[in-house]
Amino acid sequence: MTDLRNGKDKTLGEILRSQGISRRSFLKFCAATASMMSISPALIPKIAHALENARRPSVIWLSFQECTGCTESLTRAHTTTIESLIFDSISLDYHHTLQAASGHAAEAAREAAMRENDGKYLLVVDGSIPLGNPGYSTIAGISNYDMLMETAKGAAAIIAVGTCATYGGLPHANPNPTGAVSLNEVIKDKPVINVPGCPPIPVVITGVLAHYLTFGSIPDLDHLGRPRAFYGNSIHDRCYRRPYYDKGLFAETFDDEGAKKGWCLYKLGCKGPTTYNACATTKWNDGTSFPIEAGHPCLGCSEPDFWDGGGFYKALSMPTENISKTAVYTATGALAAGVALGTMNQNKKNKAHDSHSKTTVSDLEK
Amino acid sequence: MSASVEKGINALKGQIDSTVATFFSSCVHCGMCADACLFYTETGCPTRTPIYKAEPLRRIWKSEFTLMGRIGKLLGLTKPVDEACFSRWEKMVYDSCTLCGRCSMVCPAGIDIALLIHKTREGLAAAGHAPQGLIDATRRSVETGGPMGVKLPALLAQIRHVEKDTGLKIPLDVVNADYMLLLSSMEIINFPEFIEAIAKIFNKAKLSWTISTESYEATNSGIQIGVSDIAAELVQRIVDAAEKLQVKTVISPECGHAYMAIRWDGPNLTGKPFNFKVRHILEVLDELRLKGQLKINKKDSRRLTYHDPCQISRRGGVIDQPRHLINLFAENFVEMPDAGKMNWCCGAGGGVSANERADDLRLKVFQRKKDQLDKVKPDAIISACSNCRIHLEDGLEEYNMDIPLMSLTETLAEYLED
Amino acid sequence: MTEIEFLGWVRGTGFQLATVIFIAGVIIRLVEIVMLGRKANLAEPGGSEMRSGLRTIISRMIPDKSTFQRSSFTIVSGYIFHIGLFICIFLFAPHILVFKDITGLSWPSLPTPVVDAVTVVTIISLGSIMLHRYQNCVLKFLTNTEDILVWIVTLLPLVTGYIAFHRIGSSAPGLIALHILSVEILLVVFPFTKLMHTFTIFLSRWYNGAISGFRGVES
């Protein structure tokens, strides 16, 4: 029998099966998601059941001041993965990079999605919002801020994808010419799930979606609004090169013996110790590798203001600005000040000497 | 009758130099100096912590000679040096410190605490807070020539006795003599045997020596009370006599602070280098020993020990000489624990013996010396400072200890070959 | 201010401020001290000032037997925490990088777990020192606000460093920032307190040795 229902009415399970995904591999995905998100294995059937029976939710994806890297990260996987299928299986009603419609038709699609799914649709945002001048970034003549506030109103949940949306990212970097801000700074009335990273790990986005579809709620978040399941550990704590750090074995340059032996990249500026993300465990490119494994220090891209962290290749403990010159100027100035004070002291001593009259025995009593 | 707080502060200001600033900058309040001071160890009183005794000087340094202190003074945050301060520190500085310098040897920061306390005395004396006993001794020194009021006729009388007893001539006012001997009043009055011993030894060694009738007093109350002007005046008397007689070397007798005054402080007080040398009597005797001019024919089999006078050993540098000399006649010489440069003070140096107010305290802290003596149980104690000697005798009596005390010079003379 | 912003501030502006105050303060104090001058000694020397001064700089590290017995706690705990501080400050790899960044000089580091253990020992010894301060009557008597302040600012970098390394209670950027801030507080307080003994102790020992050595006594 031909299923005459349109895509939106099909459950996720039905779609997956129609695309040839076996139940076995689907359950494997559920188990992997559960383990990644530190959910008890006992809940795997619940995840599977929830996902299989979920109706495709409407998703509106807004892109503001961004580079499309986040979208690229999610869509340019080399092979089709279950994660990407999950992503395919939502009803992406508005995404101006991916949608076919343009101009008025595109905006009409967004308005229609908002109207039809009021209070139920998911809002995904990448890119920061310029507050300096609304004209810095507009879509269909609507400023980013206005479009965001309008769309956010009826959203069931808001997910900020990428460092620009979560912390302002590159546009927010010093001196922040557009007055770029993150979602958190303008949306105060509902929680924003932050999925930072430049770009974020694809599976983290699908994991958050899976959680929302399964439990109907947003996952446990840390103080920066990030799902703890993915951002609970620092890169440093989970890094396979950590033993070298503890032993004090460091690569000093990118081509020295230490670098070849795969020693710790701390001295080359690795921000692993202050960066919370899942790179070291989930890795990138279908679990192939992650920057440190490729021999490059972590840039700390999933942390606020990582652009302004004082240089990617400057070790974390080092001062961010060149202090040597300041030190020389200070020393010179202090020397002059010291000599001035020293001269005052000498004058004081001389005065004490001059005002001294020879002490005789009769001067010993009051 | 013109001592005042202002003069005291002015005097303290005059004492500040780079050593003072460095020392105060380096104190970390570790308290180790207290453990090195017999006035603390024997009384357990924390106000007797050596570095704390120099507090008035520290306050002046801090508030007048440091940037932060100047700012603090403007804001009224610094502790004042006033009448109350001087009065509070008087006993700490004069009664419970003998300037023995043991703290200076122990301080891990290398602070010469005894130097700081001595400098603090300059302020207290100028502010009218020196103890009456020391003021009186100083007045006698300036007015009569010696702290005990001993005048020339008394010395001449003693000399006549010695000449009669020994049949030796004591050379007086000999121009161009090699050595000019100084004496302490204590020796003139209580221990004329010292003059006798010198006469015997020098005669045997055929030394060219003399005593000046114009300046024979070695002690210097100005040093003890902490008044540089008076100390300088007393030193100048010796310099004048030595220059008049054109002697090559001035000999400091068996007295601790006298050696400090004439040997190490003297030229700095008068402001110009001496054109003669200054030696302690033990140094002179040791030179004679090296030249083979000390022939000893008797041995002493008693258990003997040597009490290092602080100003001669630790502060003066005459440490090995007495031991070489004692070993000439002693068959059974024993060292007390901490002997030498780390020896414990008798408890009465630095003017404490001239300060009647401190009598009970000096006898109390003698306990330290008693403990040291108890460790070696000597049959007799040898020393080389009349002040130590008098106080050791007092202390031994107080603690019912029956140990004879001997002067090294006198003992040496006794064992000299006839 | 986010944690990363805080970290950025302490590594940037904060560090600059602290270093400027530290360098200026230390130099002003040393110049003040040296410029007070010292009169030449006119007495006939009994030994070399220079040789004895240099000797005392080293020899004052080793107390004589009787002093050791009398002040053993102070000496042992003092040794432990000074050596501990030295190891923590100068032999931890991330710290060496700071010195390298400023001075261009670098030296080998100790394995991290060793520094970690030394930190614990140093913290314990500093704790026991404060306890001792309040149990010993002399120390209790001498102790003033400055002593407490100096103790706190010395202890804080150790504690915050330990917490940051083990990420106790919060996340790394904030903890590392707190650690760096505590060091900056130490640097700012340094020139105006007894912490100056770090520099002046050498001069002080030299003077002590010189004064004694001039009279022919090894001090």
Image (cartoon, coloured by chain):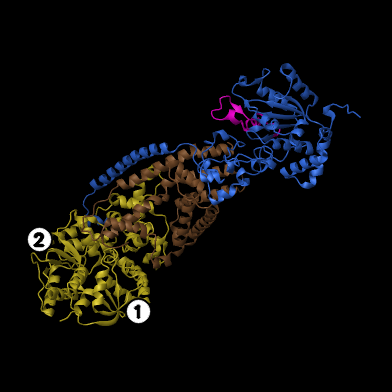
Chain colours: A blue, B yellow, C brown
Mark 1: secondary structure: loop
Residue C30 lies, in percent from the top left, at: 35, 46
Report the quarter where the C terminus of chain B lies: bottom left
- Residue that mark 2 sits on: B244
Q: What's under tag 2, amino acid-wise?
A: Lys
Residue A163 lies, in percent from the top left, at: 63, 33
Q: CA distance from mark 1 to mark 2?
A: 48 Å
Q: Earlier in the sequence, mark 1 or mark 2?
A: 2
Choose between A230 and B385: the one closer to the eye. A230
Seen in the picture, residue B349 relative to C21 is either above or below; the reply is below
Q: Residue at x 48, y 55 (%)?
A: C84
In this rendering, does residue B128 appear at all?
Answer: no
Q: Residue at x 49, y 60 (%)?
A: C132
Q: Residue furthest right?
A: A1
Highlighted magenta segment, given as a residue range: A163-192
Choose between A125 and B33: the one closer to the eye. A125
Mark 2: secondary structure: helix
Choose top left, top right, bottom left or bottom right for residue A271: top right
Q: Is residue A353 left or right of residue A241?
A: left
Residue A245 lies, in percent from the top left, at: 56, 48
Within the magenta stretch, is there residue C208? no
Q: Residues within 10 Å of mark 2 (few under 14, many from 20)?
A: some
Q: Residues within 10 Å of mark 1 (few under 14, many from 20)?
A: some
- Residue that mark 1 sits on: B377
